[in-house]
Amino acid sequence: MTKRILVVGATGRQGGAVVDALLSGVYGDFGVYAMTRDVKSDRAVELRRLGARIVPGDLDRPGSYRPYFDQVDGAFLVTDSADDEYDREVQQGTDFVDAAAKADLEHLVFASALGADFYAGIDVLDAKLSIERHIRDRGVPATVIRPGVFVQNFEAQRESIRDGKIAWPVSPNTPLPLVDVHDVGEVAAKAFAHPERFVGEDVDLAGDLLTLPEIAEAYSAALRRDVEPVHLSTEAGRERFGDTIAELYAWIDGMGGLKFDSTHLEELEIDPRSLRDALDAGDWKPTPALP
């Protein structure tokens, strides 16, 4: 029997990974309602070619997506995190959860963030915590995925890394839980395929727990050249990544890193990629020598 899943942010990073996993056929037979603000984008066209049904929708306009709840069995929700947008993000999540509750949705998978399960005083995490709590308050059958730091975040530094430097606003001894975004898609697909195992679960997700020098070592091994770790100050982090991200990493530094225990993943038979595996899959190969 085909399960129909509404995927928010289908042309984005996490939503796109969920669509790919659902359409892969590995986890069962799924009909994907790929929700996006721009149904004519190149990624939307690609998803339509792969078999997704492209549907217009905007989290800031609940009326744009409410009708889909009458047509689907489950939904994947990821909300926008941006500087000074705490209230907006919470409203997006609250409205979506309310619509899911009203429609008696069978299964909601929410993409939260590692560290959001306690009050941090950091908007980017506390918004996720507020949405998690609202899911529980409304009694929506749900799985919460809390991914760590995405390996794909380093893509913006691809040229610099290939030139031998990787810069991040964390101290050299601060461990970071790293995750390939494709693992978010795979866990979401597993959750939709096996609600009896995943409804009610909070899944902290990471494939590696590494310091910045260890991350640099992984890139060095993948590229077969030395990559130097560079500790950015909080101010330098603000200039490069914006206030929200700099504030998050300053908090992580102050916590001595984000702690992560893979025991629960093993119990759920989830085996996320290591950083090295993610780099190999992400085309981080040595630069060919010039003739």
Image (cartoon, grey):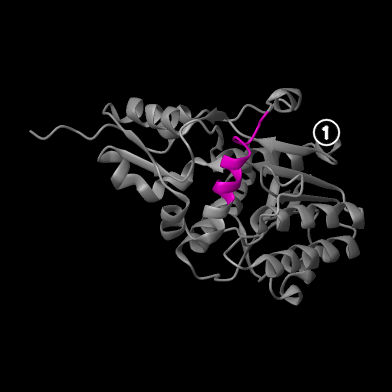
| Residue 27 visible | no
Query: Which residue is identified by label 1?
Result: 197
SS for callout 1 = helix
Q: Nearer the viewer, residue 34 or 108?
A: 108
Above-or-below relation of 246 to 115: below
Q: Residue drawn 38% across and 27% down?
A: 217
Amino acid type shown at disc 1: Arg
Instruction: Judge from the rendering whether residue 61 lies leftward or rightward of residue 226; answer left or right.
Output: right
Is residue 59 covered in magenta? no
Instruction: Judge from the rendering whether residue 253 lies leftward or rightward of residue 106; answer left or right.
Output: left
Is residue 257 covered in magenta? yes
Task: Give the residues drawn in magenta, as a range.
Answer: 248-260
Q: Residue drawn 69% across and 70% down?
A: 88
Q: Position of residue 279 (x, y in %)?
A: 42, 34
Q: Residue drawn 27% across and 37% down?
A: 164
| Residue 80 visible | yes
Q: Nearer the viewer, residue 91 or 255?
A: 255
